[in-house]
Amino acid sequence: MNNSRTDIDNWLVASDFADDDSAVSEVWEPVFEPDRHLVHIKIGPYWKLYLRPQGFVKRFYHKVYPLPVENWRLSEEIKLYDGFCTFEAVLEVRFQATLKYALGNMGILAGLNDHIKNSYQDLLSNLIQKELLELSDGSWVQKGVTAIEKRICLAVNEMLILQNIQSQALCILKPTFEEFPSVQLGRENVFLCVLKRSFEFSQAKREEMFRQKQEVERQTQEHKQKLLAQLNLDAELDRQIQAQEAANKKRLLEDQEKQLREQFEIEKQLFLEQTRQKNALKEITLEAELQEQQKHQARLRAAEQEKHMELLLHQAKLKEEKLQVDVITYEKQQAKWQQAKNKVFEQQLALEQRQKQQEFEAHHKNQQRLEEMQKQSYQKRLAADEFLRKELESLALEKQRLELQLAVNEDKKLKASGNKSDLL
């Protein structure tokens, strides 16, 4: 019987049946790209994902994720006809994720292939089981499993391509049977009919369980989708609230900046007005002090000149009185000693000439002393005028220094206010 089972297995899995020449070959040929990579750019809230182009140069803000072509092998063992027939199914899938699939799974770009395996392993197993469980009659025993393998491969490729995953599947089915000596496969169908009745009950049960499982998975998927939609809605609401708060804060800061600028302009005008008033007061005070000093100097010069003139008049009066006394004395002596002086008249004349010469010299000396005093008075006036001129120049320089200091302080305040406005 072991030899008989081996012959059946070889017969089922053989590819050179008589009717294979009339079958239409269905070959799924995806276009794989071994060098496919994703480029992810994220700057603040903005992001972009695209396939790496030719001549791409990576920058610091780029993240590159490879999308390799991966081989995936699945093995399933399915028992049919109450354990009479056991299928060993080997599914080899060669797949590669696409850009659309990556856009739908932005959080797992570094592990897309592992995510695909974990997500679709159960679905592929269910697909294989579904295809095999649909073998309700024994017609496949005579036709072989090649058509079943093709249907499974086509279903796998269609399911994955609908999920934006490029794939190429190869399915190998190897059926084995339990020993049943009285059954001659390919010639008698009695046992297959009995098995069919038993299988119909089991199949109904399995289909119900499969339907329930599919319904649970569908509900779970819908719940996940609703939850994801709610999370997206909450995130959008949070973004809108944050944007509104940022706009309100910006308007508040702009209003505060405007108020501060207006306050600064008012304070600036008040300070300039106070500065102008202080400068005007200082100018008035300086002019009054200068006028008072000029008046004082004029009074001092007038008093000094008056005093000097009084001194000169007094000296001239004293000289005149002395001359008058001298003349009177001379006349008396002349009258008294006229006779006694006749002998010495010439000597007396000479003496008088000498006395007159001395008086002339004394008068000349007095005149020189008067001129010297006048010259000294003039020099004092010049010194006083020079001192007054220097005082005026010093006051003018002090005024210029105060104006320059005020301008420097005002420039510093303007720069400080400019820096303050830049910080705001």
Image (tube, helix red, strand yellow):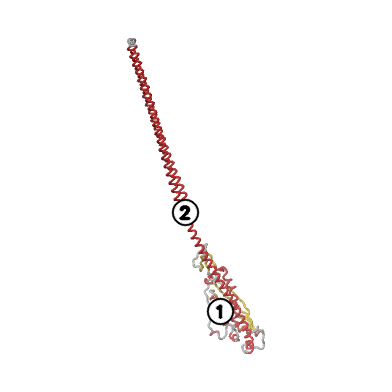
**In the depicted view, which residue is nearer to us: 415 or 28?**
415
- Which circle, 1 or 2, is nearer the viewer? 2
- The quarter of the picture where the N terminus appears is bottom right
Q: Please name the residue shown 43% across and 43% down the image.
A: 281
Task: Give the amino acid at mark 2.
Answer: Gln
Q: Which residue is mark 2?
A: 263
Is there any visible trace of residue 143 in the rendered image? Answer: yes
| 366 on left or right of 122 | left
Task: Residue 108: give x, y in percent of width and height.
Answer: 57, 69
Res 290 quadrant in image:
top left
| 24 on left or right of 10 | left
Task: Residue 208: give x, y in percent of width and height.
Answer: 61, 82
Label pair 1/2, CB-CB below 8 angstroms: no
Crowdedness near tag 2: few (<14), some (14–19) or many (≥20) residues, C-alpha within 10 Å: few
Task: Give the amino acid at mark 1.
Answer: Ala
Q: Which residue is mark 1?
A: 155
Task: Residue 299: give x, y in percent of width and height.
Answer: 40, 33
**In the depicted view, which residue is nearer to us: 113 or 303?**
303
Task: Residue 13: give x, y in percent of width and height.
Answer: 60, 82
**In the depicted view, which residue is nearer to us: 151 or 127?**
127
Crowdedness near tag 1: few (<14), some (14–19) or many (≥20) residues, C-alpha within 10 Å: some
Instruction: Assign a secondary structure to mark 2.
Output: helix
Q: Please name the residue shown 47% across and 50% down the image.
A: 413
Instruction: Assign a secondary structure to mark 1.
Output: helix
